[in-house]
Image (tube, grey):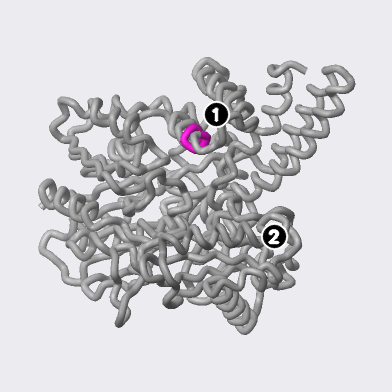
Amino acid sequence: MSNSCFGLIVMRVIIALIVCVIAGAMIVGCSGNGDAALNAEPSAAAEGVAEQTAHATANSALTADAADAAAAAAAADADAAAADAADAAAAAANAAAAAAAEDASAATTTAQSEDAHGQQIALDATVLPFAAPIVARAEGEELSEAGKIELIEAAKGFLTAIVSGQFSACIELFDDAMKAEMPEEALIIAWNSIAMKAGHFESITREEYAFRDGMDVVVLVSNHTLRGVVSTIVFSPDKKVSGLRFIDTDLTSGPGGQNQSAAGLKFLAALPDTVVEEDVIISGDPRFPLAGKLTLPKNSVAGGFPAVVLVHGLEPPQDMDATIGANKPFRDIAWALAEKGVAVIRYDKRAYSYGGTMSEVYGTSLTVKEDIIDDAVHAKNLLVSDNRINGDAILVAGHYLGGMLAPRILDEGGFAGAIIMAGSPRSLIDTILYQIEYEMGSWGEGDEDAYVQQLVNETQYEAYLSLETESEEDVKDTIIFGINGYYIREMDRHKTSGYFDKISEPILILQGAKDIQVSHEHDFGEYRRLAEGHNNIALKSYADLNHLFIRSDMDKPDRTEYLIPGTVADEVIDDIANWITENYQ
């Protein structure tokens, strides 16, 4: 069989695996190095809680059904080939379809779980050494509180054994799949590589429990003489260790419990004393009421506070805090800006609470207007009706896709200004392709998967380029990197450059140079070019900040750093607050 024939057969199957990491959020990436979030905080709407765990998001990746369809297509192609090649191709298609179904399901649903302390934590399941499926508990069955405590203690004992060099004893606690994936020699190498960076173990400073897809997960944060370590230990239902991961991070606390770094555990902090927070409902569309919070300075001011509406990225659909891994960037921004005299409203993304209903209501006709824009405008209208808010100083601040849409939201929603965080003036598809190619850069030279992935990239991008000339019916039947073609084409017809030329309101554009989900060179660089001659547009980049505007210590960042607790950098908050003061007070 020729390479082109093989590529055609495999490509249809692999398409279902090309659910890329898109920000504001983590989803499983096509290279097998993605992140799947465990969101602990439930939506206020009961329907939303049920749907977000049961349905794929309205505009997300291909589901398991699509994977089956891809397998069928691949099998059909194989039948057309020579008989001996067809048998091999069909077998490969069936195997890939099974993997695609599993990956698509993981990528398009967000598992909800409440850990022992009410905090949200996340795991990168694809990079943990899960060699075989783990038998899940019955639906809805979770450990009792006593059982959770027992597992946390077991995890602490496991970590104690590792730091004391009792590796053989640790191996005995592995399940069979784990033993095959990580023999004793591999465990020694893995721990020693962390110990060289972190130094000698001192104490465990934090412990967390979560229940994910039938697996019990314990996350331990420990201090060592040089750095901190985040240890993620996954237990199967029979309490064997089924997955293991170590990440070095900043020290979380020092003598007397004082933070030794900005990363620390500041994300566990309580609401600042100078700030108040109120529960609100964004109810512009009665079919989709959204739980939210309005954060305000405690002391009122004459004329009202300037206010910011925070707008999410694309996938996976996020809660009002934009929780990703161990971090809550929207909560960070809301609390910090309120301390500086700016009101902030944030809310659960519509697809987070109503993904299934949105699929039923909109089908393949969903656009960014229904998905994102309308709710931002509804939030603004809620602020306008509040006499504590300066109605002439309500701004939109969007992250990733929300940032890409911010100029359009400003224009269509009558906002007084826009803040673009980790956005792009290019196509959404260009940013997705950038993410895939960035991850491919870490694959080994000559990797067969890289060859297949490159074929997929080229085929998908050609399909993207043809969207503008295709009929509406054909566009709605097209999936590009897991996103419906109609969604993409409608967004592409609203160019950033056009909004920059017509908007006179102030715009602030921010990006971290260590962002791996939008390109500092191509995306921020293009913003800089488009902003030339527009005195209302200000730009600022940050050398050491990642996609979440949290400091990154990695030379070559990847999404595992989202598992490391941190907070939005103070300089970002200061720059936003100062810009608002200069333009609206």
**Where in the figure is residue 313, as x and y percent of width and height?**
42, 45
Q: What residue type is labelled 1?
A: Gly
95 relative to 478, above or below: below
Circle on res. 485: 1
In front: mark 1 or mark 2?
2
At x 12%, y 52%, the residue is: 581
Which residue in the structure is indicated by mark 2? 178
Q: Is mark 1 on a helix, strand or loop?
A: helix
497 relative to 400, above or below: above
Circle on res. 5: none
Which span of residues is magenta-colored? 436-440
- Residue 281 among those drawn in magenta: no
At x 43%, y 71%, the residue is: 200
* Closer-to-camera residue (401/84): 84
* Closer-to-camera residue (360/30): 30
* Closer-to-camera residue (583/551): 551
At x 29%, y 69%, the residue is: 260
Q: Earlier in the sequence, mark 1 or mark 2?
A: 2
Q: What residue type is labelled 2?
A: Met
Q: How many labels does the image show?
A: 2
Q: Quadrant of the N terminus?
A: top right
